[in-house]
Image (cartoon, grey):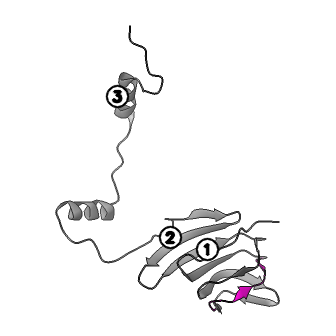
C-alpha cells in the first residue's frame, strides 16, 4: 500500500469546499480592464484609488495608502493616517518631502501644522521628533526609497 503524503489535500474534500463557495463577481471596472487586456486593448490610462481601498499598516500607529509611484521622477504620492499619540523619531530626508495636512494636526518641536497647512522638508534636511495629539490624515509626496523610521504609540 502506498504511503499517503500529509501535505496533499484530499481531492474529494477539496472539490466539496470549492462547490460550497459562493461566487463573487469582480468589480465592473476590474472586469473591463481584464477583458480589455485579454482582447489586446490598451489599458486604461487613468488611475483611481477609492477611499476604502489600499490602506496597509506601516508601523505601529500609522497606516499608509500608496496613491501613485512616478518611477521617472523618483517620487511617490501617498496618504498617511496617524493615530492620536503617535511619535515619529528624528529622521533625515534623502529627497524633498511635501506634506499637506488634510485632517488633524502634527507637531515638530515648536511648529504645529494643522488641516489646510503645507510643510516642505527639503532634501538633506532633518526633522526633530514628530508627534500628533489629535491624530492626522496627511498627503505626502516623497522620493522613492525615502525611509520612514519606526514610529510608535506611547
- The answer to whether 52 appears left or right of 150 in the picture is left
Q: Secondary structure at mark 3?
A: helix
Residue 88: x percent and y percent?
74, 74
151 magenta-colored = no
Which residue position is annotated with label 2?
Answer: 51
Q: Residue furthest left?
A: 39
**In which quadrant of the rendered image does the N terminus lie?**
top left
- The answer to whether 87 appears left or right of 21 in the picture is right
- Which dot, 2 or 1, sits closer to the camera? 1
Residue 80's label in the rendered image is 1
Q: Secondary structure at mark 1?
A: strand
| Residue 69 sits above or below residue 126 on the image | above
Q: Quadrant of residue 3?
A: top left
Residue 125: x percent and y percent?
69, 89
Which residue position is annotated with label 3?
Answer: 15
Q: Which residues are magenta?
A: 122-132
Residue 115: x percent and y percent?
66, 86
The residues bearing labels 2 and 1 have C-alpha atoms spaced at a distance of: 13 Å
> Which one is earlier in the sequence, the residue at label 2 or at label 1?
2
Amino acid at each position: 500500500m502506498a504511503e499517503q503524503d500529509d501535505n496533499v489535500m484530499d481531492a474529494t474534500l477539496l472539490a466539496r469546499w470549492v462547490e460550497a463557495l459562493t461566487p463573487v463577481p469582480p468589480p465592473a471596472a476590474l472586469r473591463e480592464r481584464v477583458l480589455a487586456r485579454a482582447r489586446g486593448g490598451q489599458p486604461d490610462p487613468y488611475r483611481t484609488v477609492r477611499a476604502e481601498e489600499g490602506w496597509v499598516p506601516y508601523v505601529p500607529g500609522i497606516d499608509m495608502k500608496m496613491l501613485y509611484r512616478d518611477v521617472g521622477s523618483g517620487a511617490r504620492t501617498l496618504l498617511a493616517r496617524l493615530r492620536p499619540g503617535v511619535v515619529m523619531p528624528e529622521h533625515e530626508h534623502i529627497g524633498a518631502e511635501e506634506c499637506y495636512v488634510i485632517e488633524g494636526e502634527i507637531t515638530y518641536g515648536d511648529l504645529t501644522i494643522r488641516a489646510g497647512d503645507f510643510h516642505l522638508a527639503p532634501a538633506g534636511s532633518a526633522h526633530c521628533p514628530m508627534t500628533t495629539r489629535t491624530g492626522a490624515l496627511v498627503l505626502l509626496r516623497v522620493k522613492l526609497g525615502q525611509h520612514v523610521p519606526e514610529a510608535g504609540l506611547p
